[in-house]
Amino acid sequence: MDDHTLAAALAEEAGRLLLDIRHEGGAAGDRKSNTLLLDRLRVARPEDAVLSEESPDDPSRLEHSRVWIIDPLDGTREYGEPPRDDWAVHVALAVDGRAVVGAVALPAAGLVLHTGHPPALVPSRSGPIRVAVSRSRCSEEVGRLITALSATPTPMGSAGAKAMAVVRGTADVYAHSGGQYEWDSCAPVAVAAAAGLHVSRLDGTPLRYNRPDSYLPDLLICRPELRDTVLTALRKRM
């Protein structure tokens, strides 16, 4: 099984588990999904390192070229609010710091989007630019971007759900500032890039993974035809 197929299969299996145990709540979901993913990776890719949100960081991962970066349950809050479907499972592989393999499962929506068969971008549309934003908070920087673009905010839950909204064509831009970690973005970035979207930091620089500090504070995913417009607006307001 190649890496792309493995990532998709693991995200799908963890998603099925999470649906089965949703009544147990987010803490159980985080723990049991993490155990499943670690067990499967230990068997399937024993030589690779793993960075997971739900496990202590092992600094030896920095000595590895290949590092699986996983978020066993992205959007714990939304997971705990059935029947919401804006939560996800992230399974990614970074090679030499680049997000090259990824799968994002949206279990409650019955979807797994992955780099083995990247989804085709839907045609561009007329009308206001739609920016995926957090349900509960929007950073000042993203708020200024929305104003500059005369955009329409589209609130939703997890980072994976917001990124996949751009991939699926229900949003045009996902810009985040104010703090994330590598497991929040690695799989979504791999899938988005494979689908032909622009991915970068908010200043346009490349996203790098498997760094000593797993904190990765900002992110931009957008349709390719909006890249220059969005980056120009961001640079004027940063």
Image: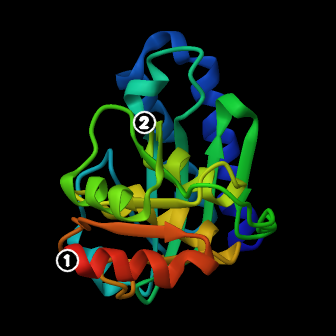
In the displayed structure, 226 sits above or below 179; it is below
**What is the x, y in percent for residue 139?**
23, 50
Q: Amino acid at mark 2?
A: Gly
Task: Residue at 28% x, 53% y: name it.
Answer: 143
Residue 110 located left or right of residue 18: right
Q: Nearer the viewer, residue 64 or 162?
A: 162
Q: Tell me which residue sits at (46%, 66%) in the image.
A: 186
> In the image shown, does 14 or 142 lie closer to the viewer?
142
The residue at which mark 2 appears reads as 75
Q: Residue shown at 66%/48% (left/top)?
A: 170
The answer for how far apart the CA atoms under marks 2 and 1 are is: 25 Å
Q: What residue is disc 1 on?
A: 212
Q: Considering depth in this image, is 87 or 47 the residue closer to the camera? A: 87
Label at residue 7:
none
Is residue 220 left or right of 210 when viewed as pictured? right
> Height in image: 27 above or below 94?
above
Q: Quadrant of the C terminus?
A: bottom left
> How is the rendered protein coloured?
rainbow
On screen, 76 above or below 176? above
Quadrant of the image containing the N terminus: bottom right
Residue 111 in the image: state x and y as whole percent. Answer: 74, 42
- Is residue 151 visible to us here? yes
Q: Amino acid at mark 1?
A: Pro
The picture quadrant where one finds residue 217 is bottom left
Tell me which corner region of the image, top left, top right, bottom left or bottom right, holds residue 215.
bottom left
Vertical arrangement, residue 26 with respect to residue 74, above or below: above
Instruction: Please tell me which of labels 2 and 1 falls first in the chain.
Output: 2
